[in-house]
Image (spheres, grey):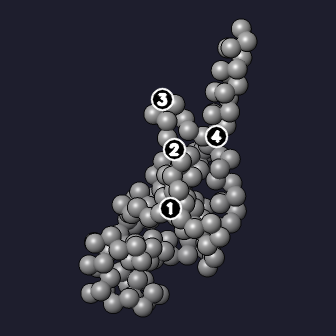
C-alpha cells in the first residue's frame, strides 16, 4: 500500500483565474458566468488551468497530459502523465486514493470523456446487487455460478 497521497490533493482548490486569461485567452467576465452555468468548454479550461501542466498523481510537468476517465461512469477524472495513466488501472494504493478523490471531484466538475477515435464515453450498466462492477469480478461471479450449478 502506498502511503503517499496524489499530488493534486496538495494543490489550492481554487481555479487559477489568471491562468485562464493568460494561457487560454478567455476574458474573466466571459469565463466566470460560463463556468458557473456549467458550460462544457469553460469546465474543460478550468480543469486544464487548475492542473497547470502537472500530472494529478505524481506532479510531473508535461505539456501533453492525458485525460483520465472512469470507465464505469464515462466521466473525466483528471489529467495524468503517460506513466501514471498506464499505471492507474493496476494499482490499489496511490491510484486508489486518486480515484476516490479525483481533480474533477475536488473542483466539482462533471465532464463526459471524449475520445477522438471512439466519441463520447458511455457509462457501463451498473448492477446495484453487485458490490463491484469491475469486469474481473463479473467473470469471477460467472465462474462461481457455474461451479455452484455443478455441485
Find residue 45 and report its horizontal and vertical position in percent.
Answer: 44, 77
Q: Is residue 13 above or below residue 33?
A: above
| Mark 4 or 2, nearer chain start | 2
Please name the residue shown 47% across and 87% down the image.
23
The one nearer the camera, 50 or 10, is 50
Q: Quadrant of the N terminus?
A: top right
| Mark 1 or 2, nearer chain start | 1
Which label was assigned to residue 135?
A: 4
Task: For marks 3 and 2, give the CA distance.
Answer: 12 Å
Q: Is residue 68 above or below residue 45?
A: above
Which label was assigned to residue 129?
A: 3
Find residue 91 and report its horizontal and vertical position in percent.
Answer: 65, 46
Secondary structure beneath label 4: helix
Task: For marks 4 and 2, give the CA distance.
Answer: 11 Å
Which label was assigned to residue 76?
A: 1
Please name the residue shown 40% across and 83% down the image.
20
Circle 1: is it few (<14), some (14-19), or many (20+) Cα within 10 Å? many
Q: Quadrant of the C terminus?
A: top right
The one nearer the camera, 48 or 118, is 118
| Mark 1 or 3, nearer chain start | 1
Task: For marks 4 and 3, give the CA distance.
Answer: 15 Å
Circle 3: is it few (<14), some (14-19), or many (20+) Cα within 10 Å? few
Disc number lying in front (1 or 4): 4
- Quadrant position of residue 145: top right
Task: For marks 1 and 4, give the CA distance.
Answer: 20 Å
Circle 2: is it few (<14), some (14-19), or many (20+) Cα within 10 Å? few
Please name the residue shown 64% across and 53% down the image.
88
Which label was assigned to residue 125?
A: 2
Secondary structure beneath label 1: strand
Q: Is residue 112 above or below residue 72?
A: below
Amino acid at each position: 500500500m502506498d502511503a503517499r497521497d496524489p499530488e493534486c490533493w496538495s494543490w489550492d482548490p481554487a481555479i487559477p483565474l489568471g491562468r485562464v486569461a493568460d494561457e487560454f485567452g478567455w476574458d474573466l467576465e466571459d469565463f466566470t458566468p460560463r463556468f458557473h452555468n456549467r458550460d462544457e468548454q469553460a469546465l474543460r479550461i478550468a480543469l486544464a488551468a487548475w492542473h497547470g501542466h502537472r500530472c494529478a498523481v505524481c506532479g510531473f510537468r508535461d505539456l501533453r497530459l492525458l485525460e483520465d476517465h472512469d470507465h464505469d461512469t464515462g466521466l473525466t477524472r483528471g489529467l495524468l502523465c503517460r506513466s501514471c495513466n498506464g499505471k492507474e488501472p493496476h494499482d490499489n494504493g496511490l491510484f486508489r486514493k486518486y480515484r476516490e478523490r479525483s481533480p474533477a471531484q475536488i473542483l466539482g466538475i462533471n465532464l463526459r470523456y471524449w475520445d477522438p477515435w471512439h466519441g463520447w464515453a458511455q457509462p457501463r450498466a451498473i448492477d446495484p446487487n453487485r458490490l463491484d462492477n469491475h469486469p474481473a469480478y463479473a467473470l469471477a461471479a460467472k465462474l462461481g455460478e457455474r461451479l455452484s450449478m455443478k455441485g
